Image (cartoon, rainbow, N blue to C red):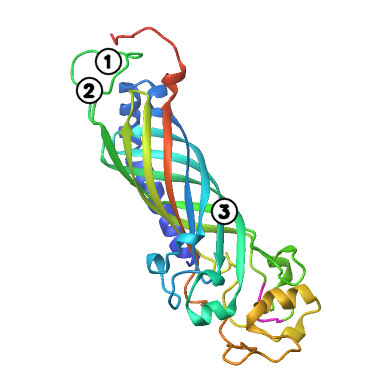
Amino acid sequence: MKRSAIFSLFLLMLGIFSVGQAQSRRYATEQNWMENFRVVTGVGTMNFLGDLGGANDIGRSFLADWDWEAVRPVIQVGARYQWHRRFATRASFNFGWTVGKDSWTEDPARNARNLSFHSFNFEWGFLPEFYFLPDVPLKGRYRRRGVTGKTGRPVLGYIYSGIVGFTMNPMARNPYDGLTYELQPLGTEGQFVLPTRDPYSLVQVAIPIGVGFSFKITNEINLDVEVGWRRTFTDYMDDVSSTYVDPNLFDSDVAKQLSIGTQAYYLDQTPEPGVQVFGPGDQRGNPQDNDTYLFFAFNLSWKLTAFKNSAPKYPR
């Protein structure tokens, strides 16, 4: 995404905050701020959608390239402040894994490429949330704190977007020595030997889009079920993007081996009949389609009042 588009999105988010500021102050006076603040934690799954692995077909975008074998766990922690019945802001931190293996797909070209990667990913960001199913005001004159039972709407629904940052570090096991190596320093697509290819950064940004439903367990505790998609601005989460380079350009045998895979080249050997062999300039990835990843999570969120033991309080 161009910088101008990112800046426009930032201004849009800033405008949303500004428009809701007056309502936020009114909402804060109606409710104790501790009732508007929640701690969020949970677990779920994370799935990589990129060049490596994927469905049993040629590379396709989004869910059409879903691979069940690439599902990995994720841990989520964060905090949410409900500054309006329809608006909230969440600080979110996610810890998870991404993985992709060509050996998992039956597509002949991808399987013959036989590359793989795995990476630990840490994501952070502030996510504006809009509640299309907001909580409803409590009926009656009194609002008692510390009394168990569910009040208001039992299920809330929300969507979110924004900008997040994340770290990545693609690694792969070298079948020739059995060791695992970080791929970015090796420059497997010629980043350190070709002037036209620059090394990629291990810190990236993404646009999150998600939807969730929050089920009230008690007045203070909710169960959130959430699905989120991340559109990144890099095609190197799996260290694969463009074309093969001449393996003789590499000074390192490890870089040579991990750049070509075990079946793509037969070094100093004659390939078996019918085995597809790739050479310099052949397609290794698709640089026109950046990598994405998906979350599916179950989170528990607690109001701060859940940690405060106090007698029922009535407003004057």
**Amino acid at the residue labelled 2:** Leu
224 or 192, which lies in front? 224
Which residue corresponds to mark 1? 143
**What type of secondary structure mainly makes up the magenta span?**
loop
Q: Nearer the viewer, mark 3 or mark 2?
A: 3
Whichever of callouts 3 and 1 sits on the residue coming sooner in the sequence is 3
The local secondary structure at tag 3 comes to strand
Residue found 29% across the figure and 19% down from its top? 149
Q: Is residue 285 visible?
A: no
Tell me the crowding category of disc 3: few under 14, some 14 to 19, or many 20 or more residues within 10 angstroms, Cα based: many
| Segment colored magenta | 194-198
Mark 2 to mark 1: distance in Å?
A: 7 Å
Q: Looking at the picture, does residue 36 appear above or below residue 201?
A: above
Q: Which residue is mark 3?
A: 97
Q: Residue at x 29, y 34 (%)?
A: 85
* Residue on which the image places disc 2: 138
Q: Which mark is residue 247?
A: none
Pinpoint residue 4: horizontal percent, then vertical percent. 46, 64
Q: Is residue 34 left or right of residue 281?
A: left
Q: How many marks?
A: 3
Label 1 environment density (alpha carbons within 10 Å; few <14, some 14–19, many ≥20): some
Where is residue 216? Give x, y as percent.
31, 30
Measure the alpha-carbon separation of dots 3 and 1.
44 Å
Between disc 2 and disc 1, whose residue precedes?
2
The reply, left or right, for residue 237 in relation to residue 179 is: left
Which of the pair 195/231 is nearer the observer?
231
Q: Residues within 10 Å of mark 2 (few under 14, many from 20)?
A: few
